[in-house]
Amino acid sequence: MLALAIPLGLIVGVSLGALGGGGSILTVPALVYLLGQSPKSATTSSLLIVGATTLIGMLPHLRAGRARLGQGLVFGLLGVVGTSVGSFLATGIPSKVLLLAFAGLMLVVAGLMTRRRRAEAQRTGTSAAPTTPAGPIIAVSPFACDCRRLAVLLLTATGVGLLTGFFGVGGGFAVVPALVLALRLPMPVAVGTSLVVITVNSATALVSRLSHGIHLDWSLIGLFAGAAVVGSLLGSRITSRVAPGRLNLWFTVLLVAVAFSTLTRTLLQPG
């Protein structure tokens, strides 16, 4: 059983490194359906695995200028309240309901990403997202504020934090679309910056969940996380070589595939 953790970890790491997300949406089903973990143990373990992976995996993106550290930290810290609330709410939800809601959310996000990609294709005549740098999240002047953009930032960060805490995920499946759709970051920059946000979100949600006395298999977590770190370093090289529109498409396909797999397995489970 432990031997499966290595190839699964590599797949998760490549997804995180290349797409800035997909780590938890792959890790949770893998831990539950392939490695025999309970949903609540799996969601907590995934925070450790994904958090460690993104912490190291963001380094190549930072060196290449594809990660905005300051904006990522601000976004992650603004979601702390949402993360804490989400972790609290998740403790009273049946495991089957949690997994079904998880799958439904992935399909919604996939739809939003598809809409964004098609809109960009129609506007530019290609599948690539704009490559012009986005402005700062918050106005630089202390006496001037783009209130609409600030409101979008606060709502988006809190919402992503809530999803992170509730579903026990690093949030990449929500962070990347949020950075692309709400904050208008180019896809490669959103991928790199999302790793910063995921690290903050994972750490915050993990603190909340560890106080609930959930049993963790540390040997499994160590093997999985080690393989995922290696995969993330390999995946980061893909981002610099693939068109943003194609990255968007891959991310969407990944969401849909895992969503339907989770729905099918959960609905077929007795009880």
Image (tube, rainbow, N blue to C red):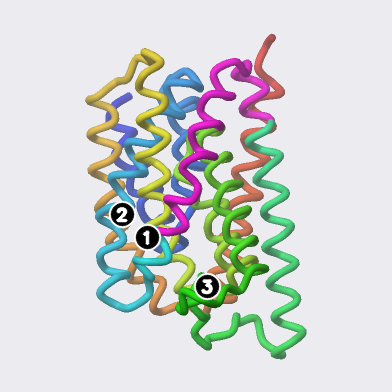
Figure check: 45 above or below 257: above
Image position, residue 222 (x, y; %)? 23, 33
Q: Give the range drawn in magenta.
A: 74-100
What residue is shown with label 2? 231
Q: Which amino acid does label 1 sit on?
A: Gly
Q: What element carries label 1?
A: helix
Which residue is pictured at 51% across the width and 76% down the height? 143
Q: How far apart are marks 3 and 2 (CA)?
A: 20 Å
- Tell whether label 1 touches label 2 (CB within 8 Å): yes
Which residue is pictured at 36% across the width and 66% down the height? 70
Image position, residue 173 (x, y; %)? 55, 51
What residue is shown with label 1? 17
Kindly report which numbered mark, 3 or 2, lies closer to the viewer in this rendering.
3
Label 1: how many Cα within 10 Å (few below 14, some 14–19, many 20+): many
Q: Earlier in the sequence, mark 3 or mark 1?
A: 1
Image position, residue 188 (x, y; %)? 46, 74
Q: Earlier in the sequence, mark 3 or mark 2?
A: 3
Q: Is mark 2 on a helix, strand or loop?
A: helix
Q: Is the magenta stretch mostly helix, strand or loop?
A: helix
- Tell whether label 2 touches label 3 (CB within 8 Å): no
* Quarter that holds the N terminus: top left
Q: What element carries label 3?
A: helix
Figure check: 129 above or below 235: below
Q: Which amino acid does label 2 sit on?
A: Gly
What residue is shown with label 3? 187
Figure check: 10 above or below 214: below
Q: Distance between the residues labelled 2 and 1?
A: 7 Å
Label 2: how many Cα within 10 Å (few below 14, some 14–19, many 20+): many
Q: Earlier in the sequence, mark 2 or mark 1?
A: 1
Q: Which amino acid does label 3 sit on?
A: Met
Based on the picture, tell me whether residue 65 belongs to the magenta stretch: no
